[in-house]
Amino acid sequence: MITSRIAARLEEQYGTEASSVSSLLEEVEVRVFHEAAEEKITAAVVILADGSVDKLLGAIELMETDWRDLLIAADLARADWSASLDDIFGAN
């Protein structure tokens, strides 16, 4: 799910390519989950990518392989994950 705060981070990190990155993430989410993923899954991809297209593709591959490993790698596989997202992306 591309929320407004994730979209803002994509714009910050990818500039003119943010729209393409957002579309790619949405396509992969639907392919993997058959619907938009939860915000924490999309956020985990963005966190791991850290503005790098190569890292983005690696994070997407990890999501496709096992999204739970993606959450672990992004340090979001814990009960307070929403507080982490607020720290990283700003509060909703």
Image (cartoon, rainbow, N blue to C red):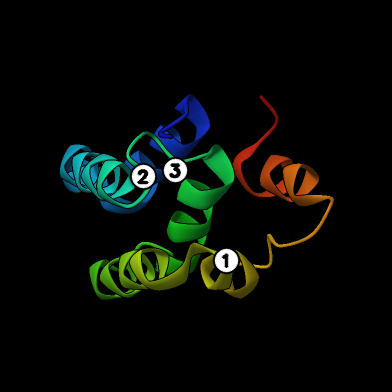
Residue type highlighted by circle 3: Arg
Badge nearest the viewer, 3 or 1: 1
Residue 63: x and y in percent read 41, 64
The tag earlier along the polypeptide, 1 or 2, is 2
The residue where tag 3 is placed is 9
Question: Distance of mark 3 from mark 1, alpha carbons?
Answer: 22 Å
Residue type at tag 2:
Leu
Q: Quadrant of the C terminus?
A: top right
> Residue at label 1?
68
| Location of residue 67 with respect to 26 vertically, above or below | below
Question: Of residues 37 and 49, which is closer to you in this image?
Answer: 37
Q: Residue at x 20, y 39 (%)?
A: 23
In front here: 30 or 78? 30
The residue beneath circle 2 is 10
Return the residue nearer the eye: 68 or 48: 68
Whether label 1 touches label 2, CB < 8 Å:
no
Q: Residues within 10 Å of mark 2 (few under 14, many from 20)?
A: many
Report if the CB atoms under discs 2 and 3 are less than 8 Å apart: yes
Residue 88, position as x, y percentages in the image: 65, 49
* Rendering coords of residue 27 (x, y %): 21, 43
| Residue occupying the point 46% across, 48% down | 42
Q: Residue at x 79, y 60 (%)?
A: 78
Circle 3 sits in a helix, a strand or a loop, which is it?
Answer: helix
Cβ atoms at labels 3 and 1 below 8 Å apart: no
Q: Quadrant of residue 45?
A: bottom left
